[in-house]
Amino acid sequence: MAARIEFSQYGPAEVLELRPFELPEPEPGEVLVRVRAAAVNAIDWKLRRGFMPSPLPSGTGLEMSGIVEGGDPRFTPGQAVFGLAPGTAVATHTLAKAADLLPKPDDLSFEQAAALPVAAETAFRTLRRLALLPGETLLIHAVAGGVGLAAAQTALARGARVVGTASPRHHDYLRSLGVESIEYGDGWPDRAGKVDAILDASGRGELAESLKLTSRVVSIASHDFPELFSSGSTEGVPLAEVFAELLPVVRLPIAAVFPLDGAADAHRLSEEGHLRGKIVISIAEGNLPQ
């Protein structure tokens, strides 16, 4: 059975429905993928709630991993891949552009691979915009999230010092990575000390105080200062370029795993925030709805 998660109206997670669909034929340059795992990002529930209106009905999910079933000859049937499938990732099958796919490394599970594309691309792009140099100090708001962790691991590998705001329950884990973690809330600039650049992955009102510490600030989560906002929809970097550097460097913990028909629960957890790593929807044969 081919099925995907869709919504026909904007609203709470309850608007998500599992619906059958006719298996598509790949166009030139496309690959048909049997999805094994798809990750959840904040933009998924923001789109579902209508913060960025788009045509309805709509699928959901941006990134996935799975097995090639046909299409572009750059990939062979049976090959394990991971990458982007904007708006259609949470499904048993999806069509993806061949340029948006990469072979899945054997040492990554399907869940681990599905968690990487959006966070890694966003981290790569925002660090490029910040022009961070070896020896400089990067502060990351919400460093325990997917983008925060990807940016932290990348910056550390490039020789930077990384300080990050996070909930206390994440501090030991972050320190094990080499991140100097500090607590959210009043007084965070004093706890952060001198920094050269700031990446805001939180969106909880830290930008005004961030700009008092440095002019090199980029946010992926707040429009309070539009000139600081960075959107992947218009500035995306090819995944091949991103992962040429980041694949050996970035590994994201999985915060929670849901079955395909648990997509609404996955969205609810994403909206709560303060997670370590990424939420993943597993679409292995053993947990498909009957």
Image: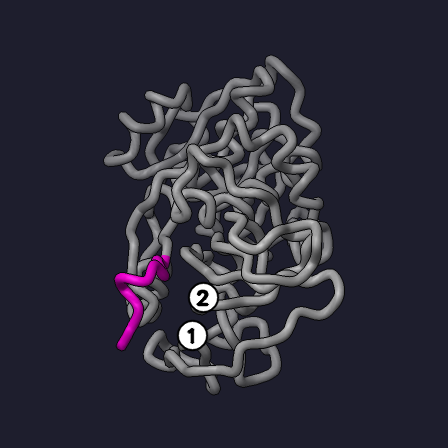
Residue 167 visible, this angle: yes
In the image, 191: left or right of 242?
left
Could you tell me which secondary element the residue under label 2 belongs to? loop
Q: Earlier in the sequence, mark 1 or mark 2?
A: 1
Please give the range of residues in magenta: 281-290
Nearer to the camera, 83 or 270: 83
Q: Position of residue 33 (x, y in %)?
A: 54, 61
Residue drawn 53% across the image and 72% down it: 51
Occupied quadrant, residue 211: top right
| Quadrant in which the C terminus is drawn | bottom left
Nearer to the camera, 83 or 51: 83
Q: Which amino acid does label 1 sit on?
A: Ile
In the image, 242: left or right of 146?
right
Tell me the tag on residue 5.
Answer: 1
- State how far apart marks 1 and 2 are (Cα): 6 Å
Q: What residue type is labelled 2?
A: Val
Q: Mark 2: few, some, or many residues within 10 Å (few <14, many ≥20)?
A: many
Q: Mark 1: few, some, or many residues within 10 Å (few <14, many ≥20)?
A: many
Residue carrying label 2: 90
Nearer to the camera, 162 or 74: 74
Asked if disc 1 and disc 2 are in contact, CB closer than 8 Å, the reply is yes
Residue 206 visible, this angle: no
Residue situated furthest right in the rendering = 28
Q: Position of residue 37 (x, y in %)?
A: 41, 56
Residue drawn 32% across the image and 62% down it: 285
Could you tell me which secondary element the residue under label 1 belongs to? strand
Occupied quadrant, residue 155: top right
